[in-house]
Amino acid sequence: MESLSDRINSLPVSETLAMAAKARELKNQGIDVIGLSLGEPDFNTPEFIKEAAIKAVEDNWNSYSPVDGYADLKTAICTKFKRDNQLDYNPSQIVVSTGAKQSIANVCMVLLNPGDEVLLPAPYWVSYSAISTLAEAKSIIIPSSLETDFKITPEQLEAALTPKTKLVMFNSPNNPSGTIYTEEEYRALGKVLEKYPEVFILSDEIYEHINYGTPHFSIARIPELYDRTITVNGVAKAFAMTGWRIGYIGAPEWIAKACNKMQGQITSGANCIAQRATIAALEAPVSKIQYMIDEFAKRRELIIDLLTAIPGIKTNQPQGAFYVFADVSFYFGKTLKGKTIANASDFALYLLEEAHVATVTGDAFGNGNCIRISYAASKEHILTAIERIANALK
């Protein structure tokens, strides 16, 4: 007899991980599937970071780490915030977690009560709404479209705010759209939020370094919002350290303390070796990872040229991250090779089965007209994958 909790029954499966699992199933059957579904750089972790990890092993860093992270790592994070973001945080405001996903979960668990509302400018990363649900809060979606470069307006933000609003989550550069909010745009949104002192802001900046020219701006730089903004970051994307699982927050001290308390009962401190390696990553100049960003920029040009040549597929010009959020609504209602495409989920499944290319439905990101395509893959894979997609759509 199944008697799972309402909590787990109400939780959706991560669409990105589900698509990756389906792709693996086909691969296990001997089918050559190209995975453009996961947001995972195809680079190896840089040598200088690996060397720091090897040294940590040799130096016997093998005991439980402090729940909120090693003191010297927290100092390195404070230095990084000052250098890259012009943000002043003390070590007491930093909590290191097992990935930025845990950082976000901690924040939601310590701030949200049942019935609170969380504003999600769409498209948003899949786990924002799921984690909010886990915290028994209600997600309120603020829509955007390709025509607005997937950005919301201050007017939309103001219209969505209610007495129940507790948290708004921003993500720039954005997953899945690659959109970046400029300083001017964030300040305009900030002007609205200044009027609502009870509302907290979570700013997910995990893609800040994967940026093709629009200067990165941290919303916590707005003095009126600093005391209620939680800045989330990590090393997974920019440093090709997805499996090392290190994320962190800079937050008001009382929120950091609460996250530390929460984490102390869930996982305790993050992996000791990964933390030592992260010190090396964050202390290095950003120029040491520029080669990866330059390569992503070339892939972006390539994939957009290839996609826009396919009739019915529309894209914006992503300014950061390594995704294209392509509008495929042209194909809805059409029948391709005997299969009727009703929505983005059908479209993504069709591409997996017919073209053997894994993407992710936009439904998971709060926009049912689009699919997310990751270009964190080799140029050869991108060329072959988009050629297969073009042939499947003829």
Image: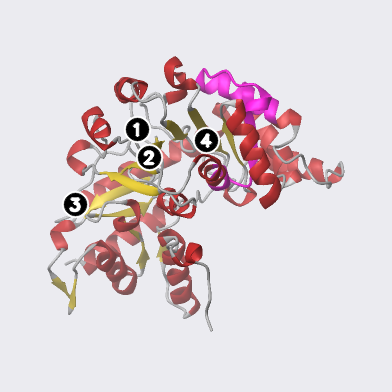
Which mark sits nearer the N-terminus, 2 or 3?
Answer: 2
Residue 284 seen: no
Label 2 and label 3: CA atoms lie apart by: 24 Å
From the image, tell me which residue sits under label 2. 174
Disc 1 + disc 2, Cβ < 8 Å: yes
- Residues drawn in magenta: 74-103
Considering depth in this image, is 5 or 336 the residue closer to the camera? 5
Query: At x 62% / y 43%, what residue is drawn?
Result: 246
Residue at the far top in the pictured view:
223
Secondary structure character of the magenta stretch overall: helix
Residue 236 horizontal side relative to residue 60, left or right = left
Label 4 and label 2: CA atoms lie apart by: 13 Å
From the image, tell me which residue sits under label 3. 309
* Magenta-drawn stretch contains 63: no
Query: At x 53% / y 72%, what residue is drawn?
Result: 4
- Decide: is 31 above or below 298: below
From the image, tell me which residue sits under label 4. 232
Task: Classify 10 Å Cα crowding around label 1: few (below 14), some (14-19), many (20 and above).
Answer: many
Label 1 and label 2: CA atoms lie apart by: 6 Å
x, y percent for residue 316: 24, 41
Considering depth in this image, is 331 or 297 the residue closer to the camera? 331
- Looking at the picture, which amino acid does disc 1 mark? Ile
Residue 211 seen: yes
Label annotation for residue 180: 1
Q: Secondary structure at mark 2?
A: loop
